Image (cartoon, helix red, strand yellow):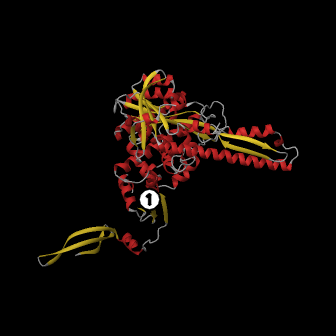
Amino acid sequence: MVYQFKQKVKGKYYVFLGKNKRIGGRSVRVWSKSLGPLEKFQKTIRTPPEKTPKNVSVLDFGGPFAFFALAKKLGLVDIINKHVSKRKEAVSAGEYILLIVLNRCLDPCSKQAIQEWYMRTALPRLLKIPEEMVRSDNLCRQMDFVVPVERQVQDTICQALIEQEKLDVACLFYDATNQYLFVDEHKGQTLAQRGANKAKRFDLRQINIALLVSRDGDIPLLHDTYAGNVHDVIQFRKIIDMLVERFVLFSKQCQDITVIFDKGNNSAANLQDLAKTSYHFVGSLKPYDFKELLEIPLKKYTEEYLNKRGQITRAHRLSWPVFGVKRIIILTFDEQTKEKNLHTLHNNIRKRYDALQKLQEKINRGLAKERKSKWRKLVNIKERVEDILDSRTTKGIIQYRIEKSSNKVSIRRWIDSNAWKKKTKDFGKNILFTDKDAWNTTDIIAAYRNKDALEKQFQLMKDSHIVSLAPNYHWLDDRIRIHVFTCVLALQLIALLKRRLQQHKINVSVYEAIEQLQQIKEVSLSIGQRRGTYRVLTELSESQKKLVKVFGLEEFC
């Protein structure tokens, strides 16, 4: 049996544990272990246990650490630091950029607000970035280091994604979008310009963003930020040059690569330049430019394509000259698109009718109150009516007649049946073209229809809760570019998160996965100097336990 005893050693008492054994009829100590000085031992025993923690903090853990794990496997920090020329500091530029990217993945905010977000997470014990260094001016300074090497960093990250994920790059989707900014004109800055904004914010300046995404995994592999007043067809020339440079990288994985793009990029020069490259393409054509093809009757649309929702698309295949070169043409028709187009047209007509009704009421109020109202002149009424009806979607369909008496105006309106038939006769039709002669019709349609993966990336980019390209608080061209660069990095990490979920057959959306990860908190209990700090995770659901395992979060607990 083990017992406790004290013994004097060099004039000082120590406490020992001992064990005796009976040998030859006598009890002999056969083992002893020192527990330390008697004075310290007595003090420890007499000190009451600290039952109540001195400090308790609850920090975000699941989301930040899951994306950190993905970035770590990708080697994001090392890739950035490899290219950035910066004097040696305690924290590298790559770590600062990673912090910005993690913020955009989970809770996008201004650079000024990142410090507060950072301290609400458990990241400080991992990144070791001092709180006082997470200032907006310092974060912007770190972004400036990346400016001259952004393209090289993009290339290396693309290479890492393809090699690590063994991406199939046989099919790539390309498109462009724009984003309005709350900035004024600044001398020497060319990116923020007025243009055809997709959100209809024509009162604001905008930037354009071009994006190339792989069909395998919906992962962004190339992007470019360009001036808001540059048309897509002009920018596509530059993208072709960038694709040529990237082919060396892509071709290591696949030699036969097809780029899918929309009709807004078409021009004779662009298609000639693309034909000189090693890429193939599938695109669409503007119906207005190929009216002869739309005249082909639907009875010739004999081929069928079944989409993921079980809806049938009818198709007709033929050869036809496009910008002077014979191409494979696929004419498609589906009832769902036709119904959608009709619904949109009905809504637009209703809006015009409502606007005319409000105008009529406004005019009659003015005539009743004012003797010299401007509405007493028929030309003023007609001018305002024409403004309301001057819409690309409804022009010529709505006819009207103004009936006017001394103090009352009536605006009669009706639908022109001939204009209606002309407008709606081609609803549901689309024209695809390609140089992939060997592909069958369903492959061509499927390739083009799958480009909605790119639209989902744009939706994420503009989501106010994830990535959130806007609002952009930068006005310098270089910082706008790096801001977009960090947003695309966030898109890449989110795509990797989605890929991990699919690989482990976890059937939840990206939004649901991020929400569940964000609910995983780290609770830190500080119980004084003697007992230190304890860290535990909040109670996990079964789905959260799976996510912890998938992203290897046990490593950081």
- 45 relative position to 290: left or right: left
Q: Residues within 10 Å of mark 1 (few under 14, many from 20)?
A: many
Tell me residue 120's x, y (percent): 51, 56
Q: Is residue 91 above or below residue 516?
A: above
Q: Nearer the viewer, residue 499 or 311?
A: 311
Q: Residue at x 47, y 71 (%)?
A: 52
- 112 relative position to 509: left or right: right
Q: In which quadrant will I find the C terminus?
A: bottom left
Q: Residue at x 60, y 39 (%)?
A: 420
Residue ID for mark 1:
520
Residue at the outermost right position? 371
Q: In which quadrant will I find the N terminus?
A: bottom left
Residue 534 visible in the displayed image: no
Q: Residue at x 58, y 30 (%)?
A: 230
Residue at the outermost left position? 24
Q: Nearer the viewer, residue 268 or 40?
A: 268
Residue 322 visible in the displayed image: yes
Q: Nearer the viewer, residue 412 or 216?
A: 412
Residue at the outermost bottom position? 25
Q: Nearer the viewer, residue 395 or 414?
A: 414
Tell me residue 508's x, y (percent): 41, 54
- Residue 170: quarter of image: top left
Tell me residue 258's x, y (percent): 40, 31
Q: Amino acid at mark 1?
A: Ile
Q: Is residue 388 above or below residue 14?
A: above
Secondary element under disc 1, as helix, strand or loop, is loop
- 252 relative position to 231: left or right: left
